Amino acid sequence: MKHALSAAMGAVIATLALAPVAQAQSSDAVLDRIRAKGAISIGYRDASIPFSFVDAQGKPQGYSTDICLEVANTVKTALNLPDLQVKMVPVNLQNRIPLAANGTVDISCESAVNTIARQSQVDFSYPFFISHTRLLVKDKSGIGELKDLAGKVIALPINSVPERLIRSLIEKDKLNVRIVPVKDNAEGFLALSTDRVDAFATDDILLFGLRGKAPNPSDYKVVGAPLSYDYYGFLVQKNSTVFLSLVNATLSRMARDGRLQALYAKWFSPMGVPLSPDLETIFNVIAIPE
Amino acid sequence: MTYSWNWGVLVQDPYLQWLGWGLALTLAISLGALAIALSVGTAVGILRSSERAVLRAATGAYISLFRNIPLLLQMFLWFFVVPELLPEGAGRWLKRDLPYPEIVTAIIALGLFTSSRIAVQVSAGIDAVPRGQRMAAKAAGLSQLQAYRLVLLPQALRIIIPPLTSEILTIFKNSSVALTIGVYELTTQTQQIQSITYQGFEAFTAATILYLAIAMTVTVIMRAIERGVALPGTTSGGLHVRF
């Protein structure tokens, strides 16, 4: 009996001693990789203003970048890795999903719209922004809606959600609009400012960013009713639920203690884009208690 | 890496059609550019071999300009910058009224870029014809034009067939750079399929096979041409050619 008791005690002690092993089991590919490398790789974009862009010194900046630096802090604490390095890795519209899926970046922090098709290759964090597809036009053009573009030309970013949306709307309404595909937002703006096109359509917040950086912002305006309702999320390798929950927990905490709202004010108020009731609701919804 | 394969995507509507359009556009751009590159390149190459210093300097400048600037940059300059430098009416015509401005620009940019490289090959080919041939042509009473047309060029063009084959292969591959100015050629369509279906590996495999098939076809045709025009007893008789 005594032997049985001490055996049981031994088993308990052994279990306690093995606790770190048990903790290691609640891990996943992304966390294992971060632990092995002692570094977290964060994907950024060069011109997705104000979410993820490089400043004049070539340093990645932005709303998404700031949130992901908090994610890195959460990971540092959760994995007990005080020396965790943060590696910033450039990504673009074409490669961000493959790079998140194959683990080149642990998290892609920019302005990716959450779609069902994309969910087949990557997982998305909680939403941290909503955008709408709208149009950037010249102030004097008199264009107010997509239908005003009949007989005119529109620039669309190659392989993007707005491109497919606008193409389908043009086809549905049989509008006579010529499409000029552009590689990125900077080229879209270049095409508009040099009169190659009459409008450039993409996520409205990116359009506000482009307008803000124009030599004469008042020459341009963002017009049209919202053509879509798109949530932005961070991209994470599929089935990395433990890492993804750390990312989401970071967003929840930041939404609850007001840091997310403060970051919004820091990046979007200078652009003249106030927090919309829709996004405020999103922030309340993702503020899940501890 | 977590990836779910689905080869069926390649034969699905509309993706098969997209690949077909992409292939057609790749062929159209490459062949259009090839026509420009061969005609301009041959002309510049002939002038380059001239004995007149001013022609040599002018063609040298042309070759330096088009050969030393990366193709990607040239494509961009032709598309976005050149229309701004022209008088407003002409610039506006290029930007707005020209049908398919991005395709036309891609053909011209790729054609002129390649023409500088072909020009170097043509002039090197002419230089490689033994000097005695030019002298003999002169001695036989042929004019400069006749000497080029009847004696120098027929030999020079045979000599440069092997490097020209590489150049033609390169033109097909370089046509993918047209992606940067919004041409929906094979590579763009492949990326488009990837961006919609997320089956990027399947789409890129298909594109790889198509590019490979184009290259093999070009090689076979050029070898047939080389054998067909070979002069008995010369090195261009295909003796040195191996796969």
Image (spheres, rainbow, N blue to C red):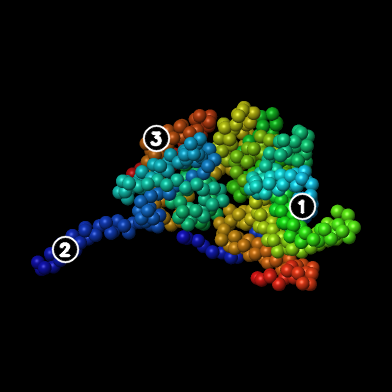
Mark 2 residue crowding within 10 angstroms, few (<14) / some (14–19) / many (20+): few
How far apart are the alpha carbons under marks 1 and 3? 75 Å
- The residue closer to the viewer here, A79 or B140, is B140
Mark 1 residue crowding within 10 angstroms, few (<14) / some (14–19) / many (20+): many
Q: Position of residue A254 (x, y in %)?
A: 39, 39
Whether callout 1 and callout 3 share a subunit is answered: no
Assign a secondary structure to mark 2: helix
Residue drawn at x 48%, y 56% is A101
Whether callout 1 and callout 2 share a subunit is answered: no
Assign a secondary structure to mark 3: loop
Q: Is residue B116 visible?
A: yes
Q: Position of residue B161 (x, y in %)?
A: 73, 63
- The residue closer to the viewer here, B58 or B178, is B58
Residue tagged by mark 3? A258
Residue drawn at x 36%, y 55% is A36
Which of the two discs, 3 and 2, labels the residue nearer the N terminus? 2
Q: Which mark is residue A10?
A: 2
